[in-house]
Amino acid sequence: MSHSSEIQACIFDLDGVIVDTANFHYKAWKRLANELGFDLLPEQNEKMKGISRMESLDMLLEMGNIEATRKEKKQLADMKNNWYRDYISEMQPQDILPGVLDFLEELTEAHILVAIGSASKNAPTIVRQVQIGRYLDALIDGSKVTKGKPNPEVFLKAAEEMGMEPADCVVFEDARSGIEAAKNGGMRAIGVGSEQMLHQADMVIPGLDHINLEKLRTLEK
């Protein structure tokens, strides 16, 4: 086995992989809808996943049949983001998804480095709240990158901060654009979620409770 294929570092997207903050986004959007005089149903909220905050806001205003100026939209988006930040500031270790801590323990014991690579500027808050900082060798968040996924910048910066070559790293991602970003950066990728959505990944698992070191090592072959 050539040295280049050995896995020496794992880079995790935060949202949907380590924690699930979708519920907090929903609560904040629902609260905004209520303030504006209508309700946001879970199935309507589904359509707002994975798109930008402003696009989500436009969709919400359309649902409520509400016109707003650009300035009003900015105020509404800021309101939503402040509520969301309040909600995540109350997150606790039990908000970590199943299997995450066991896997991080196992990686640490095997001397495999661990990083978070997230587009969210709220990533440091979440890491602090759920208390996983002790496992991390690098944390790259939205304040350290200028290009979004599928551009590999966030993952390349994480590799660089750990002193690793891209070929030594494996990325864990729940979004198609994240898998593409990993591939664009010359890294292996494990999709967390549905096979159908993430088929470009080297392996797809339903969650981190379905992976261990032994299974991770199969990517080295």
Image: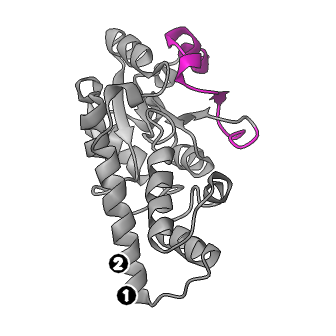
Percent x, y for residue 128? 24, 36
Looking at the image, how many numbered discs can be counted on the residues?
A: 2
Q: Is residue 74 visible?
A: yes
Task: Answer above or below: position of 219 versus 48.
Answer: above
Q: Is residue 72 left or right of residue 85?
A: right
Report the front residue among 30 and 168. Answer: 30
The residue labelled by disc 2 is 75
Q: Which of the image's four quarters has the N terminus?
A: top right
Which residue is drawn at the image coordinates 76% and 40% (left, top)? Answer: 196
Q: Are marks 1 and 2 in contact (CB under 8 Å)?
A: yes
Q: Is residue 9 magenta?
A: no
Decide if residue 162 is in sight here.
no
Q: Secondary structure at mark 1?
A: helix
82 horizontally vs 150: left or right: left
Q: Secondary structure beneath disc 2?
A: helix
Image quarter where the C terminus lies is: top right
Residue at 45% over, 90% down: 69
The vertical placement of 5 against 17, above or below, is above
Between residues 18 and 70, which one lies in front from this camera angle? 70
**Residue under circle 1?**
71
Amino acid at pointer 2 = Gln
Kind of residue indicated by mark 1: Lys
